[in-house]
Amino acid sequence: MVDLADIFSTSGTIISFILSFTPIFPFIKVFKKEEKIDILPEGLLLTLILNRIVWGSVWILTERKIALLNSVLGVGVCDIFVFLYFYLYFNRTYLKTFISSVILIIIEGGILYLALLWGNHTALSYIAMVFNVMMFISPGQKIVRVIREKNYKLIPIYSTIINILCSSCWLGYGICINLITQIVPNALGLFFSILNTSAWIYFFINRDKKKENEKEENNEDEVELVEK
């Protein structure tokens, strides 16, 4: 009989893997010199790497193979994007990119080794949860700007929908294995993703109304100028 936890973790791994490729679009723009390197999410990528390494150590210690696969794939994809970031940051110089990439891999290996040496998977899962919460709170900050500017375009709707599926799967996984450090961050991630999607739908539906209001305001300004 198939374990329900394995179904959730397998689905979550597939969706997480797809979600890992979302930075490809800003990278393409920078490579084409359509945008500056400032738009790249290098900080988020490094946080994701650290987060998945810590979770990876938890899955190794608790012998959760499918969940471990998610961490391995996640770190691998994020590493590729960080290597590309080094390449762009060092003005497309191969030697500096190679040295920086090797240093990054050594640091990652060191963190994993220390985590496994410590061996306290409960404490490690709480540390990983903190990183998860930090990442999931950032969309909550964006929603304030979206509401203030009434601009649905600020929300990347496709990745947000994928986030709903991803958080749902890992929330289900956390419930199945009774792991609070999986339940809390993914519940937050699901909440903020649904909130963002709701805001996108609301402001998308009312986009024409916003244009009409702006047009009326412009007409009023023109009338005032004429009267003066």
Image (spheres, rainbow, N blue to C red):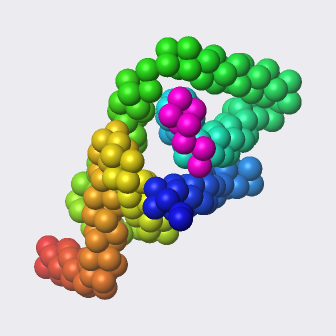
| Residue 45: quarter of image | top right
From what the image shows, is residue 45 above or below residue 10? above
Extreme residue in the right direction? 95
- Residue displayed at 70% across by 19% down: 106
In the image: residue 129, left or right of residue 65: left
Q: Position of residue 156 (x, y in %)?
A: 46, 63
From what the image shows, is residue 19 above or below residue 90? below
Extreme residue in the front direction? 1
Does any portion of residue 93 appear in the rendered image? yes
In this orientation, which residue lies closer to the viewer: 175 or 50? 175
- Residue displayed at 52% across by 56% down: 6
Q: Position of residue 207 (x, y in %)?
A: 31, 80
- Residue displayed at 49% across by 59% down: 3
Q: Which residues are magenta?
A: 59-66
In the image: residue 3, left or right of residue 184: right
From what the image shows, is residue 97 above or below residue 208? above
